[in-house]
Amino acid sequence: MSGELLVKNLGKSYRQWGSEWRRMASWFSPFIRPREEHWVLKNINFSVGSGETVGIVGQNGAGKSTLLKLITGTTSATEGQVQLRGSVAAILELGMGFNPDLTGRENAYHAAGLMGHSQAVIKQSMPEIEDFAEVGEYFDQPVRTYSSGMQMRVTFSVATAFKPDLLIVDEALSVGDSYFQHKSFSRIREFQSQGCSLLIVSHDRSAVQALCDRAILLEQGCMIKDGDPEEVMDFYNALIAEKENLKVDYIQHSSGKVQTISGTGEVTLASIQLLNSEGQAAEFVDVGEAVELVVRVQVNANIPQLVFGYMIKDRLGQSVFGTNTWHTKQVLLAAKAGAAIEYRVAFAMNLGPGSYSIAIALHAQGDHIANNYEWRDLACVFHVVNLNKIEFIGSAWLAPKIEVHQ
């Protein structure tokens, strides 16, 4: 059985009544209102279907962690309801529920017991929990001696030792080291292949787009978008741009996806072309083919300096390669209104077969967050095909030479 989740009109507020008598009176009369009321979540509605993976994204303070606490029942809702089907495992705050004076092993027994597993089942699973956590002799030391990464290892190991129908993971996964993050994501993918439903909170764009079927964007306690992960993450970036008082447009791209364009408009993209090895504009290029990206921009106002950047993304919207003229030390200084500038980027298309897109950034500094003249997603869409290379898998063509010696 796979887990299912239904969230209906969920809301959470923190109230100040002014006195205990006023709070008690509110139980008997709907006309008695709190003196102050702060809603951290309001009117949240969504579902997670059987075998589906949904990501929750948003800035700090948007209400993500509160939402997970309401779903798991560690905090009570002010309004609305949560319906769950199947067994649930949750990884919320780092080391949540662990007693610092108990050892990792003792805490593992305690946590697994709270999850509803018998002592016999826990004892049988303990070698696997210890092996996956890889904290060595510290497993039998008090948790207060652990680093945050070690706590994360034991927490994740216990929560995933027994395959749940629904796994809920908060941002806590980012605490672990790179090795354990890879190991954790491998286990999550294993659960996905077995039909486990997942609800994941993360700031990691790549993780959301790689793991999730859908993404939900929270802003100031409200749910403002639910849809394709790439589209939601682009919208999220544009939302940050809007807070910098930048103009943001959303255009239906010919590919069917929503194209996000943000910036001050002081510099804008005039045209973009991907040229093949014969110098012709091409939508389809061969693996390893020599290509050239030609980008023309229009300067609409006097600016102190201009940085040009580009990012190649795969079909899921994950970054494959990107750089800009800040990093290559080719910053253009003092561009004047009316100027037309052309950038040419030559490279070998050493990518695997598939569909790709190019995002363009025009800004003043090392990144596009400050002084963003224009950021344009899906500025160019192209396809890589394998016409004459040996068959291979993956997103990169390494032109291997294999030698066999006997």
Image (cartoon, rainbow, N blue to C red):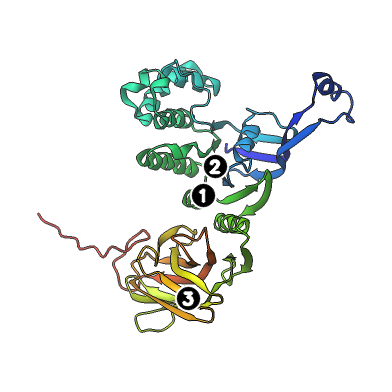
Which residue bears the numbered disc 3? 335
**Mark 3: few/some/many CA within 10 Å (<14, 14-19, 20+):** some
Q: Amino acid at mark 3?
A: Ala
Q: CA distance from mark 1 to mark 3?
A: 38 Å
- For discs 2 and 3, the disc positioned in front in the rendered view: 3
Mark 1 = which residue? Answer: 208
Local packing at callout 2 (Cα closer than 10 Å; few below 14, some 14-19, many 20+) is many
CA gap between label 2 and label 3 equals 44 Å
- How packed mark 1 is, by other alpha carbons closer than 10 Å (few <14, some 14-19, many 20 or more), is many
Q: Residue at x 46, y 17 (%)?
A: 120
Identify which residue, 214 or 326, lies in the foreground: 326
The kind of residue tagged 1 is Val
- Residues at badges 1 and 2 in contact (C-beta under 8 Å)? yes
> The N terminus lies in which quarter of the figure?
top right
Residue in the foreground of this view, choosing between 84 and 30: 30
User: Up-down: is 61 above or below 209?
Assistant: above
Q: Earlier in the sequence, mark 2 or mark 3?
A: 2
What residue is shown at x 32% (from left), y 61% (from top)? 392
User: Secondary structure beneath disc 2?
Assistant: strand
- Residue at the image point whose x is 69% and y is 46% from the top: 222
Going by the numbered disc 2, the residue's amino acid type is Ile
Q: Which mark is residue 200?
A: 2
- Eyeballing the image, is 159 above or below 52? above
CA gap, disc 1 and disc 2: 8 Å
Q: Earlier in the sequence, mark 1 or mark 3?
A: 1
Q: Secondary structure at mark 3?
A: strand
Q: Quadrant of the C terminus?
A: bottom left
Q: Secondary structure at mark 1?
A: helix
